[in-house]
Image (tube, rainbow, N blue to C red):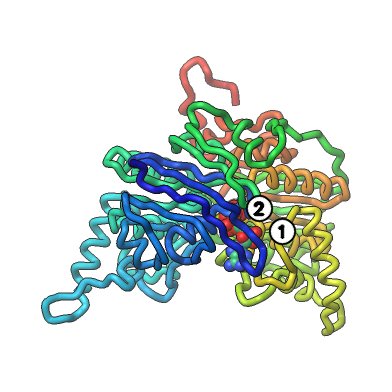
Amino acid sequence: MSLLEMRGISKSFNGVQVLKDVSLTVEKGEVHALLGENGAGKSTLMNILTGIYTRDSGTVLFDGQELKDTTVRDSEKAGIAFVHQELNLFNDLTVYENIFLGKEYVNRLGKVDKRRMIREAEELFAQLGVNVDPYVKVQELSTSQKQLLEISKALFFEAKLLILDEPTTALNNSEIEHLFGIIRSLKEKGTSFIFISHKMPEIFALSDSYTVFRNGEYIGSGRLSETNTDEIISMMVGRTYTSAEIYTPRKTGEPALKLEHYSGPGFHDISMEVPRGAVIGLTGLQGSGASALLQCMFGILEATGGSLTVNGTPVKKGDIHAAMKAGMALLPSNRKENSVIPDMSIWENLSLASQNLGTGSFHVNRKAEEAKYENYKEILNIRAASSQDLITSLSGGNQQKVFIARWLNTGAEILLFDNPTQGIDVGAKTEIYRLMEKLAGQGKTILFTSMEVPEIRKVADLCHVFYNGSIIGTLSNDQIDETSVMRYSTNSIGAQQPGRGGEL
Ligand SMILES: Nc1ncnc2c1ncn2[C@@H]1O[C@H](COP(=O)(O)OP(=O)(O)OP(=O)(O)O)[C@@H](O)[C@H]1O
Ligand SMILES: [Mg+2]
């Protein structure tokens, strides 16, 4: 008997059907990848399974029992734990309070047993190899620590089925490997997993079987060992897909951007000159300095030394408005924390940055803004019913596209994209790289960070690899490959195999 059988599930939001008679079967002790483009309905199905949304029709059998009118509590009691796509923590509570929220231990006197909760939180972290202090407030944690806390929280209650909705977006490679180790050992003990991700290599590395949805419909399922990446992507996008390289060398112009001995929190002594129309990739392990550099250039963090000039004019440090006036735009990483304005509609979220730049008029021309949105919707293939819907009604990947549009809409000449394809599906990633190429062709200058080497190779003229706050290596497009990037980003250039030395 399968652990989970969801049959004939349908769901509409405001008359728009987003799940059409879909099925999902998960066996005991397997990692089951749930795959599909942005907006395909993956998170919605998981929200139905865990009682966050109610289904319009269909049946759910879990561990031999029918789940009807499920509440969040019911699904937890049945043994289902859910790590959401976006972080779901309370910033002003401590780490241990977040773990035990609503499930606090009480001692014989009826008081909250703080000591026991802290002890068990410490034991959990030690067991999982997670370096987090149970006493600190969540707001003090780094994004990767927050993501690890979310996962630990779910693991604590020893569920039979663990749902991981894009759990690795803020983790570095060694944290991901560590997490996968934990998943594999729990799987050995019989725990099942539903794993949602847009990163093909990790899907194949971790999962046993898969189910593909497209546009709210069930497309197919099977064993991953019996298929390959191109076949899976073709099922996702509904046409034959080949993962062809799209890089073509491009002409660049005069220097548009210059950094001289530029230093700030998390990086130091960075010098580079970027010509107009270039696309520059920045990579390295989490915390290596690439993301901090972009934040400093845009004035979110304050540079501590050196200079940044745009078109020959120095840009004032630590001043976002000055950076915007100089023609820069920054798409920050970690969408939920840095980009989403939850109470605003899609078009309001989009037009926010250009309004902030100030057009001299206090009046927002809603018609014009909505027309711009329609344009970006087409270019970026944003899947949304109406521009007046709340931003939070969009799937994660579609929200990310709105934020890319937000910054393109400022007309900036220099685009700083911090992990732009976070949560973006495979097909749309290609669209975004094409768009970056097109923008570069129009004379925009682009700096972007990514930890996915094949993506960088598709679009970047040059890739700077960061280690410990400095640029440790620079690769031209034809030199960009996983091995070279990994050697630089772990600073293990001297540790090559005998006989293979000198190839860098
Ligand atoms: N609360 C809601 N209100 C209205 N529409 C919604 C709501 N939640 C989801 N939708 C719509 O349902 C569709 C499926 O969204 P869902 O979040 O399930 O996609 P997904 O497969 O998880 O995509 P992604 O990979 O981008 O996270 C989308 O078109 C989305 O806009
Ligand atoms: Mg989703």
Query: Is residue 191 rendered to the left or right of residue 402?
Result: left
Q: Nearer the viewer, residue 191 or 304?
A: 191
Q: Position of residue 457 (x, y in %)?
A: 68, 36
The quarter holding residue 303 reads bottom right
Task: Report ligand 1 position as a quadrant.
Answer: bottom right
For residue 420, the mark is: 2
For residue 404, the mark is: 1
Q: Are marks 2 and 1 in contact (CB under 8 Å)?
A: yes
Q: Amino acid at mark 2?
A: Pro
Q: Position of residue 236 (x, y in %)?
A: 63, 41
Q: Nearer the viewer, residue 417 or 392?
A: 392
Image quadrant containing the N terminus: top left
| Residue 402 visible, this orientation | yes
Image quadrant containing the C terminus: top right
| Residue extending farthest left | 108
Residue displayed at 76% across by 67% down: 324
